[in-house]
Image (tube, coloured by chain):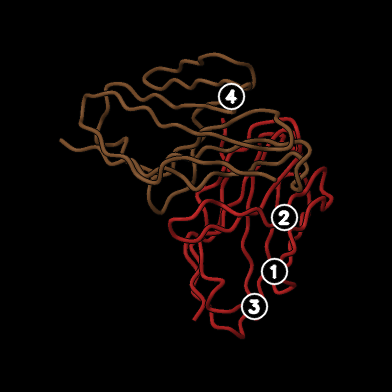
Chain colours: A red, B brown
Amino acid sequence: DTEVTQTPKHLVMGMTNKKSLKCEQHMGHRAMYWYKQKAKKPPELMFVYSYEKLSINESVPSRFSPECPNSSLLNLHLHALQPEDSALYLCASSQESGVYGTQYFGPGTRLLVL
Amino acid sequence: GQNIDQPTEMTATEGAIVQINCTYQTSGFNGLFWYQQHAGEAPTFLSYNVLDGLEEKGRFSSFLSRSKGYSYLLLKELQMKDSASYLCAVRDPYGGSQGNLIFGKGTKLSVKP
């Protein structure tokens, strides 16, 4: 089983709203990732958690705030987003981060910021 | 620097064979991945190569030459459902992403009847 789940599937929010994206995996993977993908572009890495600790933050604006409550869950808290933040947000997990493991992606959350 | 190149678009006929090429220049190398992504959906893992040679998985095969910085994905007996973008990604342990994936821009494959 290589399933990563994400909720919600779609999200529409205003620029003053606060919302959260959720990601879950039960494969025992110790690394989890957030990516942002704009139309016709490849995924762009945002954050990496390894063993529940933030190991990479790819210079992401502070209006995106990740959280890893436990080894199976990853959240992305959103606040005061801009219309250009509209994109597909993908969660992925792998056995380890860095030089080991294949990343498996969740179905994504399609976000629209008005 | 890090650079991954693949053709932007390709068209092929149902039942045919198509080869999607990927070339890369990275500081280091620890594996090359191919993902399939249908429009509006998440990438799905297809294959992984870390040693030179051909990996076969059903209708899909992937080849790697580390000395040439080159890989290809071969799709046989094309079906309409194979219409998708195909992403080449390299793991570079010495790159800025600390060994995490660097994606190419993807090749959009259209399969026609």
Disc 4 residue crowd, few under 14, some 14–19, many 20+, Cα 10 Å: few
Are the residues flagged by discs 1 and 3 from a single subunit?
Answer: yes
Query: Which residue is found at the position 68% from the left and 49% from the top?
Result: A33
Q: Which residue is mark 2?
A: A47
Q: Is residue B113 left or right of residue A55?
A: left
Q: Secondary structure at mark 4?
A: loop
- Residue for badge 4: B68
* Numbered disc in front, either 3 or 2: 2
Q: To which residue does mark 1 refer? A: A64
Chain that bears disc 1: A
Q: Are marks 3 and 4 on the same chain?
A: no
- Residue drawn where x is 63% and y is 58% of the image: A22
The CA span between labels 3 and 2 is: 19 Å
Q: Is residue A93 left or right of residue A56?
A: left
Residues at badges 3 and 2 in contact (C-beta under 8 Å)?
A: no
Pick whichever of labels 3 and 2 is earlier in the sequence: 3
Residue B36 image offset from top left, x and y in percent: 44, 38
